[in-house]
Image (spheres, grey):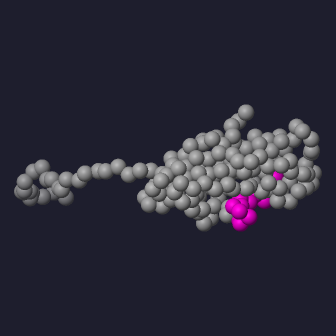
Amino acid sequence: ISGSVSVGGVFPVRGGEFTLTSAGVPGVTVSSSTDPTNPKVGEQKARVATIKVENTSSTDDVNLKMIRLRYAGAVSRSNLSNFKVEYSGSLVGTGGAISSNDLLTLNFDPAFKLERGQNRIFDVFADIAPGTRSGSNETILWYIEDTNDVVAVSTNYGYGAVVTNSYGNAS
């Protein structure tokens, strides 16, 4: 297809000018809380972790959507199941099985709202299989490997919060 049409106007074409402003992004700090007491072999709903999440923003609430823990314990991951997350005795999240690369994803559905300046302590519970070995070398340990393993979203802007990770480590 071809044609010969002349184009006229004032070039270059310009639109209105815009000024960008900055917006404060909320932050959350994730840390461990009270260590759980030693769970027992065969125990149902044993507390296996506690997670403290603090909204460090003074201007914005956040919705906590997901926390991914890396498992570093000696107890076989197949002996831990039925993961549940509670806040003040109420169920607020669940997790599937620990993956083959030792990750446990805890989903908050619906998202858990953390108001500005507030912190909450979440208890993670699991069932421990009756056939699990016991002893001082059989441990259940968790850490958060990366700040991407925590998803908290600003309620004002819909953007992810800046995460500070103070929860455990791989050692």
Image location (x, y in percent) of residue 2: 16, 57
Residue at 65% from the left image edge and 59% from the top image edge: 107
| The image quarter in which residue 115 lies | bottom right
Image location (x, y in percent) of residue 91: 71, 65
Outermost residue on the top side: it is: 171
Image location (x, y in percent) of residue 78: 82, 50
Residue at 57% from the left image edge and 62% from the top image edge: 113
Image location (x, y in percent) of residue 11: 9, 51
Instruction: Report the label total.
Output: 0
Above or below, 86 relative to 33: below
Residue at 56% from the left image edge and 43% from the top image edge: 164
Q: Is 64 within the magenta? A: no
**In the shown orientation, is residue 154 left or right of residue 92?**
left
Q: Which residues are magenta?
A: 78-91
**Viewer-closest of 58 and 62:** 58
Q: Is residue 135 visible?
A: yes
Q: Is residue 94 visible?
A: no
Magenta span: predominant SS is strand
Quadrant (top left, top right, bottom left, bottom right) of the N terminus: bottom left
| The image quarter in which residue 166 lies | top right
Residue at 62% from the left image edge and 51% from the top image edge: 53
Quadrant (top left, top right, bottom left, bottom right) of the C terminus: top right
